[in-house]
Amino acid sequence: MNNILIGIAILLAISMIGAAVVAIRVKRPAIAILAAGMISLFASILFLFLAAPDVAMTEAAIGSGLTTFLFFFVLGRVRGDEHD
Amino acid sequence: MTRRFFVVLLLLGLIAIFANLLFNYAMDSELNQTARYYAKHTATDIGAANIVTAIIVTYRGLDTLGEVTVLFLTASIIGLVLARSKNKAQADAQPTQRSNQHKTRPFPSGELLTTGSDLLVPLILLLGAYVFINGHLTPGGGFQGGAILASAALLLLLTNPSRHFSHQLISKVESTSGLIFIVLGILGIFFAGGFLDNRLLPTGTLGSIFSAGIIPVIYSFIGLKVGAEFTSMMINLAETEKKQEKNK
């Protein structure tokens, strides 16, 4: 692994930690869900750097794709309950 | 105060563990025993160009069966829980309201989203099918392909939230592919080396599409099953949401 890749990997890791902090601290749930999806997306890029394309595909498709939208569906349901 | 102290202590402990991992990390110069076995024997025994798929579907096929079962349980539990809340919502609503529910759309989606999804859904379905049919050659496989198939269904749901999906078709696809997966595994006991052995069909030449025995067949059915399960989860969630919106 050359230096550029290591630099990108460290940058990704730092932004993942940042996104995790945002996901915990932020008040609006929609932003928290998006931040959690971003963690998965960056994790999948890291898996690609570590020569694990299979895991990267799973993480991108399920972790950052489906889970994020599933959370949004559930968020919509929970909000609907609050109004009743 | 003590709680904050414990949090700081926990964080310090985690930092110590990860720093230890980081500074003592050394890349292995050679594969360990299990990995060496897989790397050496996959091409000759299994005939799959993608070693990961050979491990998932054949060497560790039983674990994959367990994984598929866990996903199936999750999907059915979600279906069960949401079906109960749906029944309650239906009992509260007037029957006349239910009949014209499909005609009235609460939020008509934009032209861009409609046209874009019409264009993209077939392509996404094609990509999903490609990913699980080529699972033994390129990275990816049944789980990834299934998730891509489900994301096509998700796009359809986003375009038109009140779109009606056939539950019967989805559950038929799901149960048939699960059954075929098990039957192929059991056939392996009688006609090949054991449960889920891939040499039910000839292994063929390494790297061609008809190779690796029944791995492409099994992985295609896993892909259909996973796609159907994810789709049914999302549809269940979306339909419950719809019922509740109407109740307001």
Image (spheres, coloured by chain):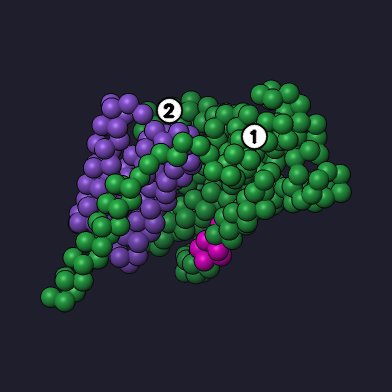
Kindly identify which chain the residue marked by label 1 belongs to. B
For chain B, the rendered hue is green
Left/right placement of residue B151 relative to residue B58 reads left
Secondary structure under the numbered disc 1 in the rendered image: helix
| Picture quadrant of residue B207 | top right
Q: Residue at x 57, y 32 (%)?
A: B131
Q: Amino acid at mark 1?
A: Lys
Tell me residue B175's x, y (percent): 69, 52
Badge 1 or badge 2: first in the primary sequence: 1
Left/right placement of residue A35 relative to residue B108 reads left
- Dominant secondary structure, magenta: helix
Q: Nearer the viewer, mark 1 or mark 2?
A: 1
**Residue numbers of the magenta segment:** B75-82
Image quadrant where one finds the C terminus of chain A: bottom left
The residue at which mark 2 appears reads as B116
The residue at which mark 1 appears reads as B40
Kindly identify which chain the residue marked by label 2 belongs to. B
Q: Residue at x 45, y 39 (%)?
A: B28
Q: Residue at x 46, y 52 (%)?
A: B238
Q: Amino acid at mark 2?
A: Gly
Q: Given the current orientation, which residue lies at the most extreme left position?
A: B1
For chain A, the rendered hue is purple
